[in-house]
Amino acid sequence: MKAMILAAGKGTRVQPITHEIPKPMIPVINQPVMELIISHLKTHGFSDFIVNVSHLAQHIEDYFKDGSRLGVNMAYSWEGHFDGDEWVGQAMGSAGGMRLIQDRTGFFDSTFAVLCGDAVIDVDFSEALAFHREKGSIATIIMKQVPRDEVSSYGVVVTDDDGRVESFQEKPAPEEAKSDVVNTGIYIFEPEIFNFIPSEGEYDIGSELFPALVEAGAPFYGVTLPFQWIDIGTTPDLWDATEMALNNEIHGFTIPGEEVSPGVYTGANVLIEEGADIKSPVYIGGSTVIRKDAVVHGPALIHSGCVIESDAEIRNSIVWHHTRISGGATLDMKIVFGPHCIDFAGNVVHLGEGGFDWLISDVRSKSVSESPLK
């Protein structure tokens, strides 16, 4: 089967991380979210993937290449253009991106799936496909029931007793929601869907294509399934996914590296000095040094090439690659990403501008006085 992964967006709600990493490449521990998606789809018989790319597009293609490393076939649809040496992204909208691919190559020649590249899922596509075919649907939304007090974060879908889609509500207040069933951004389509998508310009699946299907009375359905859906739409979501991964709560996900003590995993070439206080669950990336008297209490993720110095304290936090945390620094419920410190509400402090760069810095900087190899 064929699938399209939507990966062209800028990921504005996950900035500043997405200034440097496209959202589908944000890792859950060491694996990009999109890699987890592809691996899951492969288990359900998907073999051919097309990915629309725009923002930081080269990062995605350089990592996945032709997909052979994952045992699948992958291709890319670039949305934008080069202006001299600079890439200028120009996303076409989710449905517009589908149409661009179809007009160029006719890739979608049978039933196909389309899904966002920024959520960890374990949906049973076989069950969803059976529903789609039984209904003779041209488009099927895979939906999920959520607690009523969470509906304001999602697009609510209203269906009749047969599952036919009747209307939508975009992020309604809980008391105004007509349903507690939401759109997960996972769709199954027939090629005839292109009769409803204009050949030019931006066009969105949720806000434009789906209302057009309802208005036209097309066979358009939604199926509610129980499955794990971890949407990494915001910076706090990244922490939630990381915490679940560290606690072995993500279905099908295996923590990489070696378990050196219960719940403490490390990559290669890691030095943990005697006297360091490490409490699980923790993952420590390769070539990282944890000095004596440093405190790392999980859940915590320390990426590769870091130095956590004596008397530094890290709790409930993510530390990005090549970061030095000096003695006296305390991180609690923070994400350190390059020169930025982000709290779990999404608030960002630039370490240099805030005067904290003497406490948290890049280990590769000439200003670092202590060698990681001492």
Image (cartoon, grey):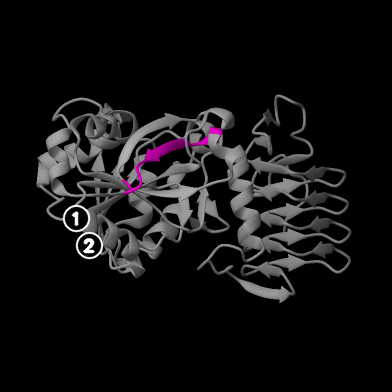
Res 327 seen here: yes
Find residue 296 and report its image quarter.
bottom right
| Residue at left offset 55%, top offset 69% | 254
Give coordinates of residue 20: x percent, y percent: 49, 38
- Please say whether residue 154 is one of the residues in the magenta stretch: yes
Question: In the image, 342: left or right of 70?
Answer: right
Give coordinates of residue 30: x percent, y percent: 54, 59
Question: In the image, 148: left or right of 95?
Answer: right
Identity of the amino acid at label 2?
Met
Give coordinates of residue 125: x percent, y percent: 34, 61
Which span is picked out in magenta?
152-163
Query: 317 or 20: nearer the eye?
Result: 317
Give coordinates of residue 299: x percent, y percent: 73, 57
Query: 337 or 142: nearer the eye?
Result: 142
Would you say the residues marked 1 and 2 are in contact, meaning their CB atoms lie under 8 Å apart? Answer: yes
Figure check: 204 above or below 193 = above
Q: Secondary structure at mark 2?
A: loop
Query: 196 or 49: nearer the eye?
Result: 196
Give the Cα separation between the discs numbered 1 and 2: 8 Å
- Please say whether residue 9 is one of the residues in the magenta stretch: no
Find residue 339 and report its image quarter.
top right
Question: In the image, 141: left or right of 27?
Answer: left
Res 373 seen here: no
Number of callouts: 2
Question: Which part of the image, by quadrant, shows the N terminus?
Answer: bottom left
Question: Which part of the image, by quadrant, shows the C terminus?
Answer: bottom right
Q: Nearer the viewer, mark 1 or mark 2?
A: 1
Identity of the amino acid at label 1?
Thr
Q: Which residue is mark 2?
A: 1
Q: Which residue is mark 1?
A: 111
